[in-house]
Structure formats: C-alpha cells, structure tokens
C-alpha cells in the first residue's frame, strides 16, 4: 500500500488501483479526494470533516461511498445509501480495503466541553487511524497514524500510547497547528533521541508518499 499525507489529519491509501481517503477536513487540500473510491470519517469536527468537500466529491464521482459516525452521516443527508453509519465492532469492505471499527468517543477535553463520538479505522488489518482519541484496537497494528498535537494529549501520553499499540511504524498526523519549532520539539521526543517508542517514528510533509505494509 502507498500512504500519502495531506493537510492535518487526512491521509490517502492506494492499493492495486483502489483509493481510500480518511478524514478530509477543513485543513485538507481539495485534491486529496481526486480519484477517491471510498472515504472514512472518524468524527464531526471541522478539521476532520468537510461537508462541502465531500458533497462536491460525491457529485463528481457517483461511485464514491462514505463510512462514518451517525452524527456525520446525518449531516450528509441527501446522499442516501452512499453514506453508511458505523460504530465500534463493525466490519466492512470499502473499495477493496477490509476495514474494522474501533472506539466510541473523542478524547476528553474538559468536563465542560461536550464529547462527540469518534471511531478509529483499522485498514487491511495493518494501518490504524484513531481520529481524535488514543484508542488501542484489539488487533495487531503495523502502521499507526499518530495524532501528535491536540488540546487533549501530552507527549507522555503519546509515548505510552505508541508503546501500548506496539506498531512497527508510527506516522505523524494531526499536526496542522504546529509550526517548525513545535514539529522539531515533538520529533526530538518521539524520534530516536527520545525515551523510545518501540516503533519507527516518521513525519511526512503534505502531499508526499511512503510505501507501507
């Protein structure tokens, strides 16, 4: 599989002519959805979900199908059976990719901030996108998409999370609010000079690709 990083939390997976996009949101370049056969959306926050972008992509490609939470699905009314609501424990095939669903809630921000539903997607039993949560799937993970920067986590939590998931590789996502200094600081903690993740840490620049699997 080929992993391509786009803005913030969005990635694209290409395999044998099929294209799967995860979390195209308001900080994502529009071309991320070019040629997409399927889309997965972890939750409703603007940086992971753009209704305008998805409706435009669905209009341009009648074959496009979207899997997401019930709250996001409700905002895509009018697309009918092209949108499927999923939750913890579900399994399905999206454009030739086998997907299982893990987790229920967005990471806790503060008692006064209402939590929204959030699901993680494990693709082909190998690559896991947790959305905005540090969900540990009950399955082996080879490649973890690691949300490295958010108001709901610390560097210490990220280190412990990667150690618990125990992937071979961890790729940085959710980094759209970081400047170069913040990116370098995180790389120092999560890379080879840090306390150790038990995994190789990578950060792809937007619109660049790596071979995984």
Image: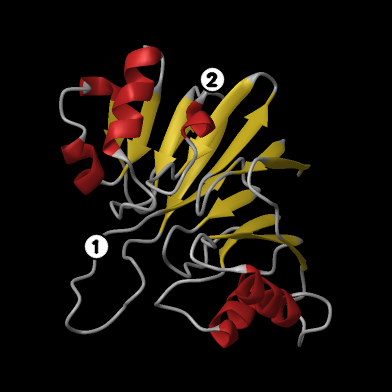
Give 130 or 202, whichever is nearer the viewer. 202
In the picture shown, does residue 181 fall above or below 95? below
Quarter of the figure that contains the C terminus: top right
Disc 1, SS: loop
Nearest to N terminus: mark 1 or mark 2: 2
Determine the residue located farthest toward the right in the rendered image. 192
User: Position of 203 compared to 165: left or right?
Assistant: right
In the picture shown, does residue 158 fall above or below 205? below
Res. 198 image quadrant: bottom right
Q: Is residue 72 visible?
A: yes
Disc 2, SS: loop
Residue to which mark 2 is pinned: 35
- The residue at 44%/45% (across/down) is 23
Determine the residue located farthest toward the front in the rendered image. 180
Q: CA distance from mark 1 to mark 2?
A: 30 Å
Q: Nearer the viewer, mark 1 or mark 2?
A: 2
Q: Residues within 10 Å of mark 1 (few under 14, many from 20)?
A: some
User: Position of 38 compared to 206: left or right?
Assistant: left
Q: Is residue 94 visible?
A: no
Give 20 or 85, whichever is nearer the viewer. 20
Percent position of residue 159, x then y: 64, 80
User: Position of 71 compared to 126: left or right?
Assistant: left
Residue to which mark 1 is pinned: 116
Q: Which mark is residue 173?
A: none
Percent position of residue 165, x then y: 62, 69
In the picture shown, does residue 158 fall above or below 23? below
Percent position of residue 73, x then y: 23, 38
Percent position of residue 212, x then y: 76, 44
Give 162 or 35, whichever is nearer the viewer. 35
User: Position of 166 compared to 82: left or right?
Assistant: right
Quarter of the figure that contains the N terminus: top right
């Amino acid at each position: 599989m080929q992993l391509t990083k786009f803005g913030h939390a969005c990635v694209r997976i290409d395999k044998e002519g099929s294209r799967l996009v995860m979390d195209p949101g308001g900080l994502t370049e529009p071309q991320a959805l070019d040629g997409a056969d399927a889309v997965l959306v972890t939750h409703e926050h603007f940086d992971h979900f753009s209704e305008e972008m998805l409706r435009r992509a669905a209009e341009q490609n009648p074959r496009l199908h979207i899997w997401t939470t019930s709250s996001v699905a409700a905002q895509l009314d009018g697309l009918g059976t092209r949108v499927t609501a999923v939750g913890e424990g579900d399994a399905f095939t999206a454009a030739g990719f086998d997907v299982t669903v893990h987790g229920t809630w967005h990471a806790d921000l503060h008692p006064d901030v209402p939590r929204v539903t959030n699901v993680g997607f494990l693709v082909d039993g190998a690559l896991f996108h947790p959305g905005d949560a540090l969900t540990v799937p009950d399955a082996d993970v080879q490649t973890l998409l690691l949300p490295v920067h958010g108001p709901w986590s610390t560097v210490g939590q990220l280190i412990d999370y990667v150690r618990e998931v125990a992937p071979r590789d961890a790729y940085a996502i959710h980094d759209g609010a970081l400047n170069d200094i913040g990116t370098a600081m995180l790389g120092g903690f999560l890379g080879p000079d840090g306390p150790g993740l038990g995994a190789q840490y990578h950060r792809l620049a937007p619109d660049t690709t790596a071979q995984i699997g």
